[in-house]
Amino acid sequence: MSRFCVVLIALLAGAGGCSRKEGRRVVRFLDQPDSGGAWKEIIARFEAAHPGVHVELVEGPPATNVREDMYATSFLSGDGTYDLAYMDVIWVSKFAAQGWLRPLDDRLPPAARADFFPGDIEGATWQGRLYRVPMRSDAGMLYYRTDLVKKPPETFEELAAAARELQKPPGLWGFVFQGRQYEGLVCAFLEVLRGFGGDVLDEKGEVALDRPEAVRALEWFAGTVKTISPEGVTTYQEEEARHAFQEGRAVFMRNWPYAWSRLQQEGSAVRGKVGIVPMVHAPGCASSATLGGWGFGISSSARYPEEAWAFIEFATRPEQQRLFHFRNGAVPARRSLFEDPEILKESPHYPELRRILQAARPRPVHPRYPQISDAFQSHLSAALVGREAPAEALRRAAEKIRAVLRK
Ligand code: GLC
């Protein structure tokens, strides 16, 4: 990772100064590596229709919080590297509150928003103004092996019991998820926390992490390590979990919808043997998927805002979101694509996924969310690796989050 960052920083340093390429106006954005090649194709289609514009994708590290830091560093310095901000739903409030984004209300009037999922539009809005056009929707879910599991579990106890019964460690473990210290860990734990009836903040906005239901949730979550989950799960991001499941090394997996199409690829050990259900919950409580999702904004320091908008308008059209789905496994943010016959044929789980997406719940919406998450991540991780007892980890996280909110 560190060598990767050095290369990347060198690349960015080079990129910042030059916003014209061979006479074309350059608009740039940062995302994770373009695994299926969808961005390449979307950019090629756009450039063919707009010969004066060059869109450059900078491929950054997979962890969302690392890319958030990269955008933030650039916007703070005003170096003009990115005309476009390709944003995780959790960055919008911070970026907008900092004044790093241009409002898009006039460019995407209410009628043009109707096809998008309401949660994605809400997550694109800060203090009543729209700052992001949704490209892909996202929500956590539970994958299971249909050849091993007779009836998918609904509760935490059922999940743990089925995992214990079916696993044969070290070759086959019960449950894999994102256990590394980064944003994905917060997303995965939030589903457990809310599934136990807890939350980060209560309805009054008070930090609720040091309450009994939260302790029960973290006891369950940390208790998976080395019992139904491999010890190494504490180093997993999305892709490590996906690989373990795809290679037939896990019965259950918590992940985002993107994994589906890869699990069905030729050569996958679990092709045709995968089901999805909402994440489990405690008896008497409800399932709660964490809302994710990505979309485009225009930076305040954009040199070419019109060209940036032309790309956003083009990239978020149904044809491009469709391509993004087929190539990169992304879930379209446009509801109409959930009725697309070819998408439904390839992804027969989409009706179920749609229900999960519609019920997904956002992470706390706050301009200092990244600091809240940092505090939370470090103590969640300490509990998973056994360095802090769950109650202690939550007490410390709660204290730090209270301090962040007081600032
Ligand atoms: C996915 C989600 C994003 C989340 C991230 C965590 O990319 O769409 O919202 O922050 O995973 O790893």
Image (spheres, rainbow, N blue to C red):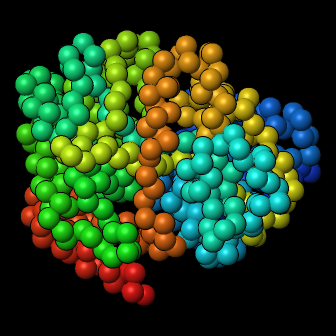
Asked if residue 13 lies left or right of residue 19, the reply is left
Q: Quadrant of residue 156?
A: top left
How many numbered marks does the figure carry? 0
Where is residue 285? Give x, y as percent.
25, 48
Q: In which quarter of the image is residue 304?
A: bottom right
Query: In this orientation, which residue lies closer to the viewer: 179 or 235?
Result: 179
Query: Of residues 186 and 121, which is closer to you in this image?
Result: 121
**Residue 130 x/y as whole percent:** 69, 61
Residue for point 25% across, 39% down: 280
Residue 92 makes an appearance in the image: yes
Quadrant including the C terminus: bottom left
**Image point (37%, 75%), residue name:** 204
Given the current orientation, which residue lies at the most extreme bottom position?
407
- Residue 343: quarter of image: top right
Residue 306 vertical placement versus 224 (above, below): below
Q: Residue at x 62, y 76 (%)?
A: 98
165 sits left or right of 303 in the view: left
Query: Considering only vertical position in the picture, is 287 above or below 185?
Result: above
Q: Position of residue 121 (x, y in %)?
A: 62, 52
Write the residue at 9% across / 64% down.
389
**Looking at the image, which is closer to me, 200 or 84?**
200
Q: Which residue lies furthest to the front in this view?
A: 284
| Residue 69 against residue 138 in the figure, above or below | below
Residue 406, image x and y in percent? 39, 86
| Side (left or right) of 31 relative to 362 | right
